[in-house]
Each structure stands twice: as structure tokens, then as C-alpha cells.
Amino acid sequence: MARPKIALIGAGQIGGTLAHLAAIKELGDIILFDIAEGTPQGKALDIAQSGPSEGFDAVMKGANSYADIAGADVCIVTAGVPRKPGMSRDDLLGINLKVMKAVGEGIKQHAPNAFVICITNPLDAMVWALREFSGLPHEKVVGMAGVLDSARFRHFLSLEFDVSMRDVTAFVLGGHGDTMVPLTRYSTVAGIPLPDLITMGWTTQEKLDAIVQRTRDGGAEIVGLLKTGSAYYAPATSAIEMAESYLKDQKRLLPCAAWVDGAFGLKGMYVGVPTVIGAKGIERIVDIKLNPTEQVMFDKSVEAVKGLVEACKGIDPTLA
Ligand SMILES: NC(=O)c1ccc[n+]([C@@H]2O[C@H](COP(=O)([O-])OP(=O)(O)OC[C@H]3O[C@@H](n4cnc5c(N)ncnc54)[C@H](O)[C@@H]3O)[C@@H](O)[C@H]2O)c1
Ligand SMILES: O=C(O)C[C@H](O)C(=O)O
């Protein structure tokens, strides 16, 4: 049986890391696409030459033409611009919206049956725009952010509790911005909810509040340290987790920016919610009950995302 075809649209920091991870995990044959001539070809050749040591079998090709993504089973989109220190993700909206138009049209023409994972920021508005430009079914176009934000929360919690990250679960919902909603009530250490760990004396409310804030600022913390761009190792790993769930029909329950129409009282919008990813794409949205405090935070985040979508419509009238 032929290997699945994975098209990586954008061969920058995340694109290159995605290609390496997908090869090491033998998820399929890989096309690295970028508008920069030489970059995808150079990275593809470099990664292919790690094959003998890693022991993977995958065809690895760099390309500057959308024709090369033809028939892709999965497209992961990182094309665009990352932020620099002092910028917010929302400052990227105008420039990256134009990129989503080109990418969406390329996918529509050459890979209409793909499962598409958008990573480009500002994430929730860009995945919405990419879906609009590509015209693919909503359940086949999803945004990566919640897996990354939850991984950051899990990492910080594991440091606080001095336990393995594997035993920490966490859910961060809402938009991928300053208003994201780390849900302490639905986050656990080996099944013990965080509020119970405060009662047990493992931590304090103040320390937990600081970890929640560090999670919300997780992207900016790395941008401030790198100075030339944003995080790429953990973002790539997070998207690979989602792609693998689709390709292997794992039905992982992951927080993703999915099309929500009905659940959470929302009428047709992309925002971070718990989702099940399987062979059909987004197969289910898990409509968990939020308490009044969580609901206020979630509503605020939803409004922020709606504002960015309206801004997109203002920039590109074809989206209105
Ligand atoms: N969703 C998340 O959680 C998350 C996490 C990290 C980064 N990001 C975002 O991902 C994006 C990529 O980050 P990066 O670090 O890989 O950036 P990068 O600058 O290293 O790579 C981006 C690549 O996109 C290419 N590109 C630009 N316009 C293009 C077009 N029209 N078609 C094809 N390729 C094009 C560039 O040539 C470049 O190689 C940024 O917008 C960043 O903010 C999102
Ligand atoms: O912070 C950024 O600009 C990149 C990304 O959204 C992240 O959270 O790392």
C-alpha cells in the first residue's frame, strides 16, 4: 500500500521541524512547499540525508509549485510570518491573511481531499480564512493551538509538582491569544483535579494563578528569548500529534481550533474546544460544561476571535 502523502506548506522553522518529525515517525512521504526558492529543496535534502542514521523510509521533496502537493492526504500550513518581540499575534493578521488566500486556493485546486491543519497566526482567524478560501468541508480544516498551550501548561505543572509530564493532563480552550482559557478544573495529576491538589497542600492558589498566566504568556516568553521569531519545536510536535491521530484513526481527544456550530452555545465559528480527531477529520466536539467563572473567560476569548474574523472581512471583501 502506498504511503500517505503529507504536504507541508511553509518550509521555515516549523515546516522543517515538521518534516523531520514526520520522517522519523514514518507518517508518510513528504512534500515541503515554500515560495522561497531553494529553502524547501535544501531542507528536504538535508532531512533525507538523516534517513540512514535514523533508519526511516520516506520520500522527501522540496517544491515551489502547488502542483507538487497534488493528492496530499494531510496539509500542515505554516506559511506566513512569525512575530518578533513587542508584537502581538494579532499584528500579523493583515500580512498572513494574504498568505492564507494563496495557500487556500492552492489546496482547493490540488489537494481538496486533504485533512488540513493550520498553524499560521493569528491562529483562530487564519484557520477560519483558510477554510473559506479553500472551500473544504469544515471537519477537514482545523487549527493547532490548544495542544501546544496545554503542553505548556502540563510542563509548568510538572515542574511545580515534581512529577512526570506524562501524568499531568490539561485543557486550554478558547482563542490562541492573551484571552486563552487554561481550565484548572479539568486539568489533573494522575486524575486528581488541580483544585483538589490545592486542598491537599501540593500547591497554592497564588502559585497556580502564576502558572496559568505563564501559560497564557508562553508564546511571548519564547519570542522574547529567541528575538528573531517564535517557538517551533513544541508547535511542530503538537501538529504532528493531530496529523497522526487523523492518519491512524486514533480518535485522540485533543483541544483544537475547530468549527463549532451548536456546541458551547456558539453559532458557526472557529475556536479552541475539545475535539476527537479520527479518519473522518474532526469527528466530535465535546461540549463540556463550564462553570460561571470559566464561561466568562471563554466568552471573552470568543469575542476576541470574532473581532479578528470581522477584521479579516474588512481587509478582504470576498470573505464578507
Ligand atoms: N498556532 C500556533 O500555536 C503557532 C505556534 C508557533 C508559530 N505559529 C505561527 O506559525 C507561522 C510560521 O512560523 P515559523 O516559525 O515556521 O516561521 P518562518 O518564518 O520560519 O517560516 C514561515 C515560512 O513561510 C514561508 N512563506 C511566506 N509566505 C508564503 C506563501 N505565500 N506561500 C508559501 N510559503 C510562504 C516563508 O518563506 C517561510 O519559509 C507564524 O505565523 C507563527 O506565528 C503558530
Ligand atoms: O507566540 C507566538 O507568536 C507563536 C505561537 O503562537 C506560540 O504560542 O508559540
Image (tube, helix red, strand yellow):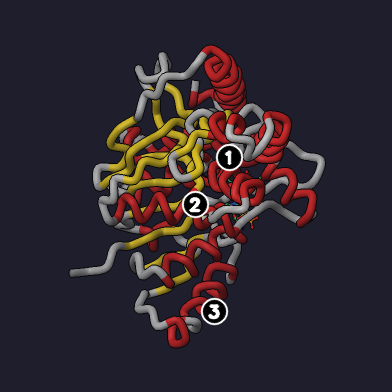
State yes or no: discs 3 and 1 in contact (Cβ < 8 Å): no
The one of 117 and 44 positioned closer to us in this rendering: 117
Q: Decide if residue 305 is on the left or right side of residue 263.
A: right
Which residue reaches farthest left?
1
User: Is the CB of mark 2 within 8 Å of ligand 1?
Assistant: yes
Residue 11 percent location from the top left of the image? 55, 61
How far apart, in angstroms, are the residues tagged by discs 2 and 3?
23 Å
Disc on the earlier residue, 2 or 3: 3
Which residue is depicted at the point 76% across and 47% down? 84
How far apart, in angstroms, are the residues tagged by discs 2 and 1?
25 Å
User: Is the CB of mark 3 within 8 Å of ligand 1?
Assistant: no
Disc on the earlier residue, 3 or 1: 3
The quadrant holding residue 265 is top left
Check disc 1 and report the residue beneath it. 98
Residue type (three-letter) at the residue carrying disc 3 = Asp
How far apart, in angstroms, are the residues tagged by discs 3 and 1?
30 Å
Residue 253 percent location from the top left of the image? 36, 41
Check disc 2 and report the residue beneath it. 238
The one of 171 and 107 positioned closer to us in this rendering: 171
Residue 197 percent location from the top left of the image? 57, 35
Disc 3 crowd rating (10 Å Cα; few below 14, some 14-19, many 20+) is some
